[in-house]
Amino acid sequence: MKGVLELIHTDLWGPSPTVSRDGYKYYISFVDDYTRYSWIYPLKLKSQAFEVFKLFKTQVENQFDTKIKMLQSDLGGEFRAFTDFLNQNGIIFRHSCPYTHHQNGLVERKHMHIVELGLTLMAQANLPLQFWWEAVHTTVYHINRLPTPVLKFLSPYEKVFKHKPEESFRGEDTRDNFTSHLYSALSRQNIQTFIDDQLNRGDEISESLVNAIEASAISVIIFSESYPSSRWCLDELVKILECKKEYAQILIPVFYRVDPSDLRNQTGSFGDSFSKLEERFKENSKKLQTWRKALKEAASLSGFPSQSIRRESELINEVVNHILKRLDEVFRLRDNKNQLVGVESKVEEIESLLGVESKGVYALGIWGIGGIGKTAIARAIFDKISGDFEGSCFLENVREESQRPGGLACLRQKLLSNLLKDKNAIPGIDLNFRRISHMKVLIVFYDVTCFSQLESLIGSLDWLTPVSRIIITTRNKQVLRNWGVRKIYEMKALEYHHAIELFSRHAFKQNHPDVGYEELSSKVMKYAQGVPLALNVLGCFLHKREKEVWESAIDKLQRILHPSILEVLKISYDDLDDKEKSIFLDVACFFQGEHVNPIMKFFNASGFYPEIGISVLVDKSLIAIDSHKKITMHDLLQELGREIVRQESINPKNC
């Protein structure tokens, strides 16, 4: 054989007389004929061999940028399932003659060598037999790095990677163990993963690697003791942090047998490795400063310290589960972007108000009428930044849930469980809240209607850590004032070009109206007045309808509010007292666009205490007072008021 992956020998060993501590009974080995480099993977069942081979194939073909040409086994039962897959992928499947001394000889001898050395290692370390998998895995690591006469006293490692294994070279303490297992675990979850295995490099990181980093939704960096000994690792880190800022890419650090504080300050054994790099690059202080800054920034992110989790398998499971959760958030955010229009600038404004990079507890209110898009923008913000916090919770339907018996207690339980990642967290135990007081948390309270709800759920901001962030969505501005929220973002209606795009996505499944429907769409825009709820509801209702239906619906909307829109807008009205309701209905029917002073006199004469009533209506976004002191009301809210009067009045024509 003249090249790597031209022929791969494979065989399965087991069952072991003792099950490993992680439940493994077998392992499958793959040996490259040309380099004699070996890979082994643990199995709990023989039937897993086929899936593991597919993972192995993906990993090595990506790593070496070439295809497996031939696969050889003894044609045991576990390999019979390979046939169709190998044919489909153009891999020649050959097997040795059974019951002869040639039967899969190379890999059989390798098994004997691995097991004998593994048992020796366990005996030397006085380890129980449950550690047999760790022993054989370590054995393969060393076999790959030991010179062999078959390769003219080169090691398999030298043959495959074209250089000697160096103690200071990056990745040696993680690549063949934790990294490969994490890669396999991600592949088993069908997560497309690019692993950087280009050990033989030039002066700069490759264009293909840069492209892979930029195209990724998530980057996982495994920081180990030898990590800073490689300039390429550090250059990759700088690039990944750039992508985090520019593309909101998610970065997940794993601190593999290193302390984050050593990473942050370049101390301990991590610092020793960095010192060697400093010596090599002492003439390039700018580069060193860039690397130090990148390490400090990465160490400050919420990650996974291996010291706090005993078994690597448990750590890998936690990392994979976290990645799955973050990918779900990414895809949901992308779906939201497909459904939302005009949110990017609003997200940027709200991020700026939140002061994500600043210290000090920030609470931000998002305020506006029902259906204006408060929930959507809060969810977009949450999905974008929640990964930068140790704990996060999007607490939905506070208004609705708090009205149910025991509803606030259920919400408090959900809040604690999400922040602490502990389903058994007990709301009444102060210890749980003390635990949160040391965490960097992000909490979104959605649809809060009164101050007491926030008091019951979280108390005050004083006990939260200074880097935590709170977002509250509400229709009532006074709720935010009562809780001491100083930063309030008012949600406004969409501009026309965004409104027509959002409506078209629902009505025509594209970003613009169909030919011939432009004028009808414009009439809908006039009715909806940029309220996303109305645009969504009407777009879905009119989708694939004939023009006659459009014309009839638009004519009807001039007289009767759509039930779905009425239901949402009426929530704010129902929350008013009787005098406030009367003021709202009078404005809707008689005083839209009138100067506030004579209206105040009118309501005073009627005994309605308008100073309070009008202030409440303004706080609840039901009316506004413009710069000319005129009372204004959104067209949909005016239609709501008139519809209520129609339903309640004996003589609807009064309106």
Image (spheres, rainbow, N blue to C red):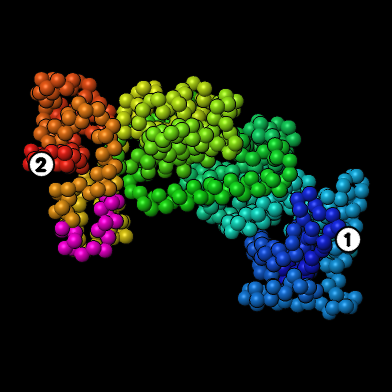
Q: Is residue 249 above or below residue 67?
A: above
Q: Residue at 75% x, 77% y: name it.
A: 94
Q: Quadrant of residue 74?
A: bottom right
Please tell me whether mark 2 sits on a helix, a strand or a loop.
helix
Viewed as shown, does residue 453 lie left or right of 155? Answer: left
Q: Residue at 41% x, 35% y: name it.
A: 404
Which circle's residue, 2 or 1, is located before the other in the chain?
A: 1
Q: What's drawn in magenta, residue-wise?
A: 535-552
| Amino acid found under the numbered disc labelled 1 | His
Viewed as shown, does residue 609 lie left or right of 205? Answer: left
Image mark for residue 113: 1
| Amino acid found under the numbered disc labelled 2 | Pro
Task: Report the Cα–Cα distance between label 2 and label 1.
Answer: 94 Å
- Residue 544 in the image, given as x and y percentages of width and height: 26, 63
Q: Quadrant of residue 113?
A: bottom right
Q: Main secondary structure of the magenta part?
A: helix
Q: Residue at 51% x, 46% y: name it.
A: 249
Residue on which the image places disc 2: 652
Q: Residue at 44% x, 48% y: name it.
A: 333
Q: Foreground: 571 or 548?
A: 571
Circle 2: is it few (<14), some (14-19), or many (20+) Cα within 10 Å? few
Asked if the stretch drawn in magenta spans residue 540, the answer is yes
- Residue 201 in the image, given as x and y percentages of width and height: 67, 54
- Residue 210 in the image, given as x and y percentages of width and height: 56, 52
Nearer to us: label 2 or label 1: 2
Asked if the stretch drawn in magenta spans residue 18, the answer is no
Circle 1: is it few (<14), some (14-19), or many (20+) Cα within 10 Å? some
Q: Foreground: 567 or 269?
A: 567
Q: On the rendered image, what quadrant is the C terminus found in?
A: top left
Viewed as shown, does residue 364 lie left or right of 70? Answer: left
Viewed as shown, does residue 489 lie left or right of 320? Answer: left
